[in-house]
Amino acid sequence: MNGRRDGPLMRNSSQGSTKSKIGTAIFIGVLLGFVFAFLFPGGVFKSSSLSIRDSRSVKFITQTDSSSCDSSERIDMLKSEFISASEKNAQLEKQIRELTEKLKLAEQGKDHAEKQVLSLGKQSKAGPFGTIKGLRTNPPVIPDESVNPRLAKILEKVAINRELIVAVANSNVKAMLEVWFTSIKKAGIPNYLVVALDDEIVQFCTKNDVPVYKRDPDEKVDSIGRTGGNHAVSGTKFRILREFLQLGYGVLLSDVDIVYLQNPFNHLYRDSDVESMTDGHDNATAYGYNHVFEEPAMGWARFAHTMRIWVYNSGFFYIRPTIPAIELLDRVANRLSRERNSWDQAVFNEELFFPSHANYEGLYASRRTMDFYLFMNSKVLFKTVRKDDNLKKLKPVIVHVNYHPDKFPRMKAVVDFYVNGKQDALDPFPDGSDW
Ligand SMILES: *[C@@H]1O[C@H](CO)[C@@H](O)[C@H](O)[C@H]1NC(C)=O
């Protein structure tokens, strides 16, 4: 290719008749050669790394030079350069397509799942039939004491095996709280804590030697805690619980309309993010069943199958310190603060159970339903158990008076029946409420 630069000059210099003319011509030629070499040190036409546009201009020049004997060779070379350039171009286009696709996925947040799977690390082959098991016991978070050093100190003293019962209470529920902690003491459970929402409860607990913790002021949560009704106070607990989990503790969240008869920590499985008591009253409603919905107008296809389960009771559940569990608390607290008229138990269940669809991302925390005879709701007790001679003999772990508005007298009756041995203590009460 270098020949192309001085080729025409050589032809010019070879024309002439006398020696001196030739000498002058050679001199001028050499001089011009120097000038060109100085002005274009890389060559007049660059030969390396041709783009498509370059190769076209080169083609035009070779056509004017078509008399030279190596032109066909050159054309071949340029052709191959053109081909390799087109290949490079196609590669770049493919890269652009891939990057655009990735960008689109990232915008939709859909690459999140893939990243999560990759971050879980080791991929493995599935084992033989019947031997494989998915993950339901998520790893606990690394405890972060900096979120609340004062609470961390309290929990160090109160918790056993990094677990404890937690109740949130204001002075509206003082009478029930007393039955609550008296039953806990009687059952010999040392690891429990009352989160007091007002000073009266702090004093009441201190006086009764009950472990108590009052949070640092947080106006957003506190105004609900002071003045809020039953549902509103229930809502604040999801915010309050977060710190316990961040500190690395498993919490058995407990309403105060609950009587303890045995130590619940001896009856937990601890294999799920959330292990909850149920509002169900038998195997089907507590653990799930196939409910057939009938629509006669559909004729042949008149039966549609549905999956049903009675809701989890958001007044008594064990929650492990895991990422999905903390996400659940955040999602519920977030929705309760935005949807003023929502019921925390409905929101809690919707977040736990609804699958992803369209732009909605489901939670997929792992769940376990507690045994409904051991962790008994008051419908099971008053509608079934108290009328069945065998079931009557079983001692539940707890009884939750969630199904009845006359909570306080029924709580005392439960204590009388199971603790004080008064066989007729439950008899005066109707199955449901009288109204
Ligand atoms: C409910 O399930 C348990 C096992 O989980 C079983 O032993 C019991 O017989 C079932 N009860 C009924 C009424 O089907």
Image: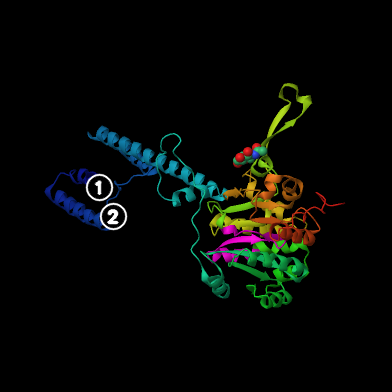
Query: What amino acid is at disc 2?
Result: Phe
Q: CB of mark 1 within 8 Å of CB of mark 2?
A: yes
Q: Please name the residue that numbered disc 1 is placed on.
A: 5
The quadrant of the rendering that contains the N terminus is top left
Inspect the magenta stretch and tell me whether residue 370 lies in it.
Answer: no
Q: Is residue 255 rendered magenta in the image?
A: yes
Q: In this view, does 56 lie to the left or right of 150?
A: left
Q: Is residue 235 left or right of residue 145?
A: right
SS type, badge 1: helix
Q: Is mark 2 within 8 Å of ligand 1?
A: no
Callout 2: SS? loop
Residue 40 disc label? 2
Q: How crowded is mark 2: few (under 14 residues within 10 Å), some or many (20 or more)?
A: few
Image position of 132 (left or right of 13): right
**What is the span of residues highlighted in magenta in the rendered image?**
239-265
Q: Is 241 situated above or below 364?
A: below
Residue at image point 76% right, 71% down: 171
**Hey, what amino acid is under mark 1?**
Arg
Is residue 263 or residue 245 the one in the foreground?
Answer: 263
Residue 377, percent from left and from top:
71, 52
Which residue occupies 72% across, 44% down?
388
Toward the right, the furthest residue is 435
State ligand 1's quadrant: top right
Q: Can residue 338 be seen in this view?
A: no
Q: Which residue lies furthest to the top in this view?
A: 300
